[in-house]
Image (cartoon, rainbow, N blue to C red):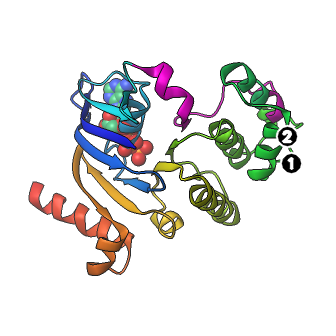
């Protein structure tokens, strides 16, 4: 179980996010939604323990991501921020680097994960020759290589074509069903993830304005996208 308790990170300029509370159970997929600059990437970085938070905590199975990274990091898969700087390596060589970071990753696991993300034909090419979508697939492979309990994804499909986005969503959906992995995913393409998320969490101007299950949302809205647009317009009119 992943628990986020009053997590906050405010940059010197006053931007960032505050007061994020979230509980993610095994098998749950939470969409982190918000307009540009709302604080989604900052929140994911703080949840990953990459960014020191000002207040609050994030815990995976009771261990703090900030204070006990040796207990949490091996169980987290991260795809946050710019793709790998190791662009002079091939996709395969990049994934092999993970041998050193995590126990239990063998040759078979690497091959299997390359196949999983649809990179079997391209893993021998240098990453600098990859398209944006191919880079994202290899990043996703690196996040999945050690079969994490929790996956944190920041706009994971933004560079992919329509078929690629559908394919990756199907793969992640199956992995969640098979392994009970949890996912927190930020995306501006709500309709891409609508079919496999279990919850939506909205951040607006650095504030957590609510989290609801998809089942709850569908009682009142035709889609998660409509729920999101409604929530954001309420906030904007309240702020006006
Ligand atoms: N290192 C930093 N120092 C100061 N301000 C920052 C820093 N990083 C981000 N910000 C600001 O914090 C706010 C939140 O940024 P963040 O990248 O988390 O938003 P986001 O919701 O992921 O946006 P987008 O959807 O555009 O990717 C923005 O106003 C951004 O300019």
Q: Is residue 154 magenta?
A: no
Above or below for 221 versus 235 = below
Q: Which residue is drawn at the image coordinates 64% and 65% (left, top)?
A: 166
Asked if labels 2 and 1 touch by Cβ distance under 8 angstroms, the answer is yes
Asked if residue 8 shows in the view, the reply is yes
The quarter of the picture showing ligand 1 = top left
Using the image as rendered, state which of residue 134 and residue 28 is in the foreground: 28
Using the image as rendered, state which of residue 48 and residue 235 is in the foreground: 48
What separation in Å lies between label 1 and label 2 (alpha carbons)?
6 Å
Above or below for 69 versus 206 = above
Which quadrant is home to the C terminus?
bottom left
Above or below for 158 versus 138 = below
User: Badge 1: few (under 14), some or many (20 or more) residues near its Cα, within 10 Å?
Assistant: some
Q: Which residues are magenta?
A: 68-93
The residue singled out by tag 1 in the image is 120
- Residue 19's spot in the image, x, y percent? 20, 39
Q: Which residue is drawn at the image coordinates 41% and 20% (left, top)?
A: 68
Above or below for 6 versus 181 = above
- Residue 196's spot in the image, x, y percent? 51, 65
Residue 123, numbered label:
2
Query: Would residue 187 be found to the left or right of residue 158 on screen?
Result: left
Query: Would residue 126 be found to the left or right of residue 228 on screen?
Result: right
Give the image quarter of residue 92. Answer: top right
């Amino acid at each position: 179980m992943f628990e986020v308790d009053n997590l906050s990170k405010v940059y010197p300029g006053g931007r960032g996010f505050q007061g994020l509370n979230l509980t993610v159970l095994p098998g749950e997929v939470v969409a982190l939604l918000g307009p540009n600059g709302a604080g989604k990437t900052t929140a994911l970085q703080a949840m990953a323990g990459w960014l020191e938070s000002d207040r609050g905590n994030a815990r995976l199975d009771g261990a703090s991501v900030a204070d006990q990274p040796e207990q949490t990091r091996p169980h987290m898969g991260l795809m946050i921020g710019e793709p790998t700087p190791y662009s002079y390596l091939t996709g395969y060589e990049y994934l092999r680097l993970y041998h050193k970071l995590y126990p239990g990753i063998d040759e078979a696991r690497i091959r299997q994960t390359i196949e999983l993300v649809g990179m079997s034909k391209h893993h021998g090419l240098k990453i600098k020759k990859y398209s944006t979508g191919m880079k994202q697939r290899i990043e996703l492979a690196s996040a999945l290589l050690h079969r994490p309990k929790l996956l944190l994804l920041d706009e994971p499909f933004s560079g992919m074509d329509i078929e690629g986005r559908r394919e990756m969503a199907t793969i992640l959906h199956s992995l969640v069903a098979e392994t009970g992995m949890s996912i927190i995913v930020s995306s501006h393409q709500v309709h891409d993830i609508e079919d496999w998320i279990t919850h939506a969490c909205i951040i607006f101007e650095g504030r957590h304005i609510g989290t609801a299950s998809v089942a709850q949302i569908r009682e009142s809205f035709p889609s998660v996208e409509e729920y999101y647009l409604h929530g954001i317009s309420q906030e904007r009119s309240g702020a006006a």
